[in-house]
Image (cartoon, helix red, strand yellow):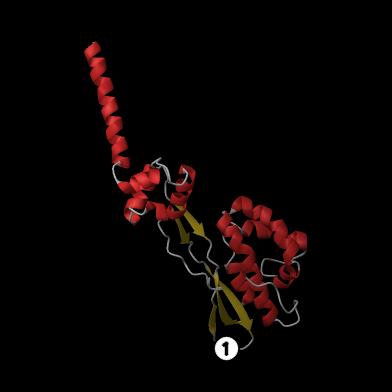
Amino acid sequence: MKCTIILALASLAMGSAIEQRACAGNNCNRQVTGTRAGLPALATRAADCASFLAVTVKGVQRTITQTHFVAVATPTVAVVAPRQDTSSSVAKAIPTYASSCDERAYESACACAGVAPTTTTVRVPRATKVVTAVATGCAAMAVSEIPACGLPCFEEKLADYGCKNIFDMECQCSQIETFGWEITACLEINCSHAVVEEIYPNAVKGCNCHAVEFPGALPAEFPTY
């Protein structure tokens, strides 16, 4: 029994020693994880590792479409590009105290030091596509863009605002701010968040169209998205 226990302890000790040698068996690892005099503090070396292993990636760019309505056809399409990031990326340098490391060896040594890579995603400014369309059949267009989940909400609120029916654009658009706020609570129950986010911009688009199709019926310009 004693012999078995001694052999087991010896095996654990040998495994620990092998594991340590796997991380400390070359000059690069010693420079990153070692404790000899002249090296920066371990906390400093860990911070250097974290900085070296940090990766920044760009998120997915979204493109939104703005529709400019006109009375007469003038087909044009323009894309408004987002402001470009002029900052230049700087190549990451291996610290001078880790002179025995190449990039791959330094990454391995940092892993031995217990530092893991991190990834940060940065937001990319959205692009805007502007299209020109003739303002005709605006009410039908606006109603067609209301999702099925949202129709009961519109029908419920129309009478409260004195609107004849869902095609009464002049009534709805002239009260779009208050009408929009009240109807949102109902939409959030009936529809998904993604659908709710699209309903108000589509309503504004319908009102912009109606304002051009029937000049003087509404204020000349509504907010655009």
The residue shown at (77%, 64%) is 162
- Foreground residue, 9 or 37? 37
Residue 100 placement (x, y as % from top left): 33, 53
Residue 92 placement (x, y as % from top left): 43, 60
Residue 139 placement (x, y as % from top left): 64, 73
Q: Quadrant of the C terminus?
A: bottom right
The residue shown at (25%, 25%) is 11
Q: Disc 1 residue type?
A: Thr
Tell me the SS state at disc 1: loop
Mark 1 nearby-residue class (10 Å; few <14, some 14–19, many ≥20): few
Q: Is residue 137 above or below residue 103?
A: below
Residue bearing mark 1: 74
Q: Quadrant of the N terminus?
A: top left
Residue 178 placement (x, y as % from top left): 75, 62
Farthest residue, direction front:
37
Q: Is residue 139 left or right of residue 86?
A: right
The residue shown at (22%, 14%) is 3
Q: Is residue 222 left or right of residue 136?
A: right
| Residue 136 in view here | no
